[in-house]
Amino acid sequence: MWREKQLIAGALAHLDEVTVFKLVRKGLAKGLDQFLLVEAARDGVKLVSEKYHRGEYFLADLIMSAEIFREVIDLAIRFNPPKVIDCPPVIFGTVKEDIHDIGKNIVIGLMRCRGLQVLDLGVDVAERDFLAALKSTASNILCLTGLITPAYDSMRRTIALLEEEGMRDSTSIIIGGLVNEAIREYVKADYFSTDASEGVPLCIKIINKKTSLKKKKQVKG
Amino acid sequence: MTEREMTSFERIEAAITFGSPDRVPLCPQVDYMAVLLAGKTCADFITSVETANESVRVAFEKLGGWDWLYPPAASLLFVKTFFMEVKIPGKDLPANSIHQIIEKPVMFMEDYDFVIEKGYQAYKELIYNRLNKEIDAEEIKTILFEIVENHKKWEEAGVPIQKAGTHLLPFEIFCLHRTFEEFVRDMYRIPDKIIAAGDAIVMDLINEIKNSCRILNNKAFWLGVWRSSASFISPRQFEKFVFPHMKQISVALIEEGYRPIFHLDGDMTPMLQFFTDFPKGTCVMALDGCTDIRKAKKVVGGNMCIMGDVPPTLLCIGTEEEVRHYCKALIDDIGPGGGFIMGSGCTVPINAKFENLKTMIDVTKTYGKY
Ligand code: B12
């Protein structure tokens, strides 16, 4: 497995789409854990990102790496559909005024791969559209992506709207993108993350906590 | 040393052809900014050739004049004819916003074959159809007539007009019509199709440029580089997809006495060496502040005239002192040996400070003497 992981990460880092697919297909056919294969591709995306920040790769390369990654996820899910976690979908979107979605799509891919259902609202999503989606699906996890400065105010407004509607306390809010602890505090979110791999277990933890809380409540009730 | 002061025509010519200009020539590319000085709106500027011309005349006088005039109605003509969706001030936008170009997919993967088979004219028709954009030939004829008349007046008054039209390379055209992210996929998956489709339209593009130069009575034209900088693609991609057509188009036209102005938006520093490939003194490289202009001077400075690159941000939020300092440094570092035109990075932003632009112009007229 170790060797396969390295080969996949390496091929993705070279943006060699054909080889990545060959390796992933072979791995899947051999019965290797699909999530590990996806993680290997994710390592490749990270390498591309590092090269981009060192000036060795360019924007087009970064975009292509995310595209190959998206396809690896599709392939893995198609080959072996994960057991879907039975709960309302995670509501996800890039906030108003912002159109950056490469990171968002990576996180969503990983979530789906782990059996989480996700409602992807896309980019430049208005505050009230997040609200409407939470209401219509009875979801209580909201994931927001933002990379440009105006996005922070959009996040803040979205969360303020939940507050107004009395939905803030029942909703767990995670922000990602170009964010940090200060931004989390400014927008009044519950968590921030700049690492896709971190986001998935976090959501699963929240869901487990919420379901057990609900169960407890039901027992009490 | 020349005895008398040069005319703007002589000064620009000397800078481009590596003669001896008497001072660094000036080309602040004043566009929408003029409307504020003239008390007009962007909506007027983009709909009436007369208003555009009059606004720029007011700005020219208030700022004390310069050597190479960005065509006053260039944006108007562009907005009317460009094959992308454009949001228009006063119609789709508030009256005092500048126009916005909307990137949406109007070309699809299978269209490369269409281009290869049917050529440029059919492709243009296809795109205009998908955009639902109708070009009113009679209206354009009238606009062109007015523009040419105005240009004649400027030139009779001793102010040369910078360029005829704005033109794009095949790479840029397909990239804008496909949208960037889709186009990235094409570059990796069907590179040969992109190149072949480019080959299929390149001769028509050359003719289109000649035609527009003839109508607008100017040998200089813009080749816009918007998506081919290192802010988007790698030097290897530039070499493969962009440069061959850039060279083919430019060289063919240079041979017939035309003058490409490479309007380079974004960071072109890693691509500079490609620009050593053009005959000396035949083109202009216009930089917007993202490319390392000192490196450009080292790499192409002896061969190609460099124009630029007072950054838009500096013109908007800098102080007069900062602008003075920036321009003096440009004159010191890029000026020696001629081959330099003091210019704004891209066009002057609408919210540029008057004093800052005035400082850029005044400093160049005094400190820029050779
Ligand atoms: C790619 C890119 C673009 C592409 C976007 C393509 C796309 N479909 O996303 C294009 C070219 C279109 C673009 C446009 C613009 N961009 Co841009 N862009 C970038 C760039 C180079 C990389 C961003 C990226 O994709 N990173 C890779 C991904 C994987 O990282 P990520 O998004 O952070 O996501 C990771 C984590 O944060 C996390 N994550 C993300 N979301 C979430 C959510 C949750 C819940 C969790 C748990 C985790 C998580 O997981 C991901 C994987 O680990 C950055 C530079 C940079 N240093 O970031 C500039 C950058 C973000 N852009 C910038 C700007 C200014 C713009 C423009 C305004 C430029 C312009 N003048 O037109 C426009 C924006 C238009 C708009 N309204 O949004 C600035 C923002 C500066 C600021 N403070 O405002 C940056 C920082 C560049 C810079 N240094 O100036 N851009």
Image (cartoon, coloured by chain):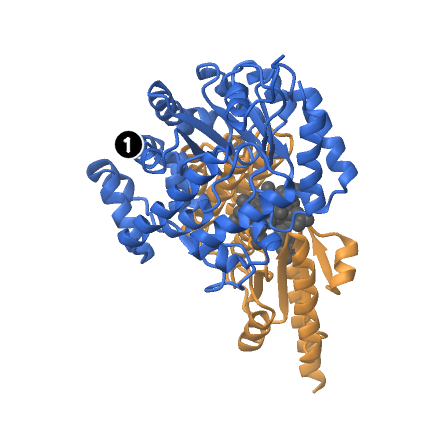
Residue shown at the point (32%, 44%) measured from the top left: B109
Name the image quarter holding residue B67: top right
Residue B166 picture quarter: top left
Q: Is residue B244 above or below residue B201?
A: above
- B222 on left or right of A151: left
Q: Position of residue A131 (x, y in %)?
A: 60, 73
Tell me if residue B252 can be seen. yes
Q: Nearer the viewer, residue B52 or B305?
A: B52
Pick the front one: B2 or B318: B2
On the question of residue A118 being in view, the answer is no
Task: Look at 71% across and 56% down and name the residue there.
Answer: A192
Can you say which quadrant of the picture contains the C terminus of chain A?
bottom right
Which residue is the site of mark 1? B207
Secondary structure under the numbered disc 1 in the rendered image? helix
Residue A95 position in % (x across, y down): 60, 61
- Rendered colour, chain A: orange
Report crowding for label 1: few under 14, some 14 to 19, many 20 or more residues within 10 A (C-alpha).
Answer: few
Vertical order, B129 against A63 (above or below): below
x 53%, y 25%: residue: B12
The colour with which the image depicts chain B is blue
Q: Nearer the viewer, residue B92 or B350?
A: B350
Q: Chain of mark 1?
A: B
